[in-house]
Image (tube, grey):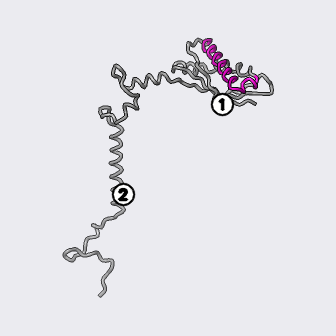
Amino acid sequence: MAEKKDAAPAGKDGAAAPAAKRRNPKLLVLVAVGVLLLAGGGGAAWFFTRGSDAPPAAGADAAKGGDKAKDGKPGEKAEEKKKDLPYFVEFESFTVNMKDPDRYLQAKLTFMVKTTEAAEAVKDLMPVMRSAVIPVLSSKDPAEIMTKEGKDKLADEIVTASNAALAGAGSTQKVDAVLFTHMIIQ
């Protein structure tokens, strides 16, 4: 009297349980993961799309620019700080022959200006600016610009030439400083 091993288990009344009630554990795990993903996605959507009527998080005022200004407008202090920061306009690399015909200079310059209008003027008039800078760079002897003082003097001369080029092109904007971001003398 051997029993069959693959027979369905018996219920309370001894009858075999139907095969349809068996649960697949992989399916249950997949459904649970799907529900968690949907809940997480819904929570994220709510968090990122909620309006400005929600109270700000702690420290949000500090991140926006600190305290309110005298007239009560939030973030105005940040705008004032932003106005104080300079704007930078990078130029492509210059490669010019120097005073000594066997030597050349490769330099990358960044121009510092005070306003966005000045930055736009420098960008718009870049060919005029490059044309003004090349003679200044090529008129130098390598020994002149090897020292810090020589580089500072060269930067001042480039600022003067750049401002003259801007004025000559009809712009009222000016360059405040020039920064050397790359320089090779060979």
Q: Is residue 148 magenta?
A: yes
Residue 16, compared with residue 139, is above or below; it is below
Residue at screen point 40% across, 30% down: 64
136 sits to left or right of 83: right
User: Could you say which is closer to the camera, residue 110 or residue 42?
Assistant: 110
Q: Is residue 96 magenta?
A: no
- Residue 76, image x, y percentages: 39, 23
14 sits to left or right of 126: left
Q: Which quadrant is home to the N terminus?
A: bottom left
The amino acid marked with disc number 2 is Leu
- Residue 11, image x, y percentages: 22, 74
Label at residue 133: none
Residue 165, compared with residue 2, is above or below; it is above
Residue 122 sits in which quadrant? top right
Residue 133, compared with residue 36, is above or below; it is above
Residue that mark 2 sits on: 30
User: Could you say which is closer to the camera, residue 146 or residue 99?
Assistant: 146
Query: Which structural element holds mark 1?
Result: strand
Residue at screen point 34% across, 64% down: 25
- Residue 34, image x, y percentages: 35, 53
Residue 162 sits in which quadrant? top right
Magenta-colored segment: predominant secondary structure: helix
- Magenta segment: 141-168
User: Could you say which is closer to the camera, residue 130 or residue 30?
Assistant: 130
145 sits to left or right of 65: right
Residue that mark 1 sits on: 182
Mark nearer the N terminus (1 vs 2): 2
Query: Which structural element holds mark 2?
Result: helix
Residue 154 sits in which quadrant? top right
Q: How far apart, in angstroms, are the residues tagged by discs 1 and 2?
A: 57 Å
Q: Which quadrant is home to the C terminus?
A: top right
